[in-house]
């Protein structure tokens, strides 16, 4: 806009320039004059629309499990298994979903950057109450059990389930610090689940002590052992 011109003067000037021009010429002039403004407006609309769509269609997470140092079966599909679990548990899949976080590897002997990032990732998820279940090996369990990550399973699992696992020798007992209970079961041996590549490698199922959805964590344990 020229200095001293009003908005109305500017509009009149633009109309005068377009007078007598063909539609194609008018479009070319419009694009040249307003293309930056138009592109910015389009980008705002696109990103704004995507943000609104994401918020509107986002599902509630009703169970999240982290697989730490787990070698899964070749045919294992985390998204499909999560969807199958939701369906099996009778959860409304239109409103809710489960999340299985695989590919988390922590090597305490290696001490590399990847391990440090994954340690922080799991810690952050536990602190934020974003995790309900952790499935892991001996190494990670032994490093974190004293930190109070894992729930006393007698407070979460049904008595008959505890008795069954006890009879099968599948419970791992641990003396959790800062309580007076002594040793309590904190993990179930689920290595025989079809989820895993080898049934010889330890695989411990733990409910996170501050889990937001412990009941769904128990259902996930039942689901994992369906075709054991």
Image: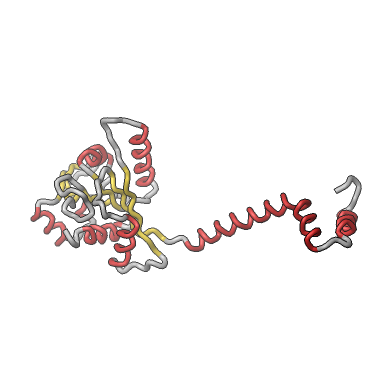
Picture quadrant of residue 156: bottom left
What number of labels is visible?
Answer: 0
Q: Position of residue 163 (x, y in %)?
A: 12, 58
Task: In this rendered view, identify the residue nearer to me: 157 or 50.
Answer: 50
Q: Residue at x 18, y 42 (%)?
A: 175
Is 221 rendered above or below residue 145? below
User: Residue 58 placed where, x, y %?
Assistant: 46, 60
101, above or below 117, in the image: below
- Seen from the viewer's position, the closer of residues 47 and 118 is 47
Q: Quadrant location of residue 123?
A: top left
Q: Is residue 100 visible?
A: yes
Choose between 132 and 28: the one closer to the eye: 28
The image position of residue 207, as x and y in percent, is 26, 52
| Residue at the image position 34 percent from the left and 50 percent from the top | 101
| Front in this rendered view, residue 117 or 39 | 39
Residue in the image at 77% along x and 59% along y: 27
- The answer to whether residue 186 is visible is no
Horizontal side of 198 relative to 45 (left or right) equals left
Name the residue at the left extreme: 167
Residue 46 location (% of width, % of height) = 60, 57
Q: Residue at x 68, y 55 (%)?
A: 41
Q: Is residue 106 left or right of residue 42?
A: left
Which quarter of the image is occupied by the C terminus?
bottom left
């Amino acid at each position: 806009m020229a200095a001293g011109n009003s908005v109305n003067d500017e509009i009149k000037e633009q109309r005068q320039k377009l007078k007598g021009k063909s539609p194609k010429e008018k479009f070319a002039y419009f694009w040249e004059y307003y293309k930056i403004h138009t592109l910015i407006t389009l980008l705002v609309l696109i990103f704004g629309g995507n943000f609104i769509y994401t918020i509107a269609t986002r599902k509630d997470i009703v169970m999240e499990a982290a697989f730490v140092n787990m070698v899964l079966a070749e045919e294992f599909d985390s998204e499909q298994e999560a969807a199958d679990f939701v369906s099996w548990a009778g959860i409304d899949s239109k409103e809710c979903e489960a999340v299985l976080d695989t590919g988390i590897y922590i090597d305490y002997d290696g001490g590399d950057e990847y391990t440090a990032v994954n340690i922080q990732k799991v810690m952050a998820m536990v602190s934020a109450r974003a995790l309900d279940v952790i499935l892991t090996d001996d190494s990670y369990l032994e490093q974190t059990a004293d930190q109070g990550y894992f729930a006393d399973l007698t407070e979460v699992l049904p008595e008959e389930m505890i008795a069954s696992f006890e009879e099968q020798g599948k419970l791992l007992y641990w003396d959790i610090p800062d309580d007076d209970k002594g040793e309590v079961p904190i993990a179930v041996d689920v290595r025989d689940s079809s989820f895993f590549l080898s049934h010889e490698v330890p695989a411990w199922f733990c409910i996170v002590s501050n889990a937001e959805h412990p009941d769904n964590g128990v259902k996930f344990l039942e689901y994992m052992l369906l075709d054991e």
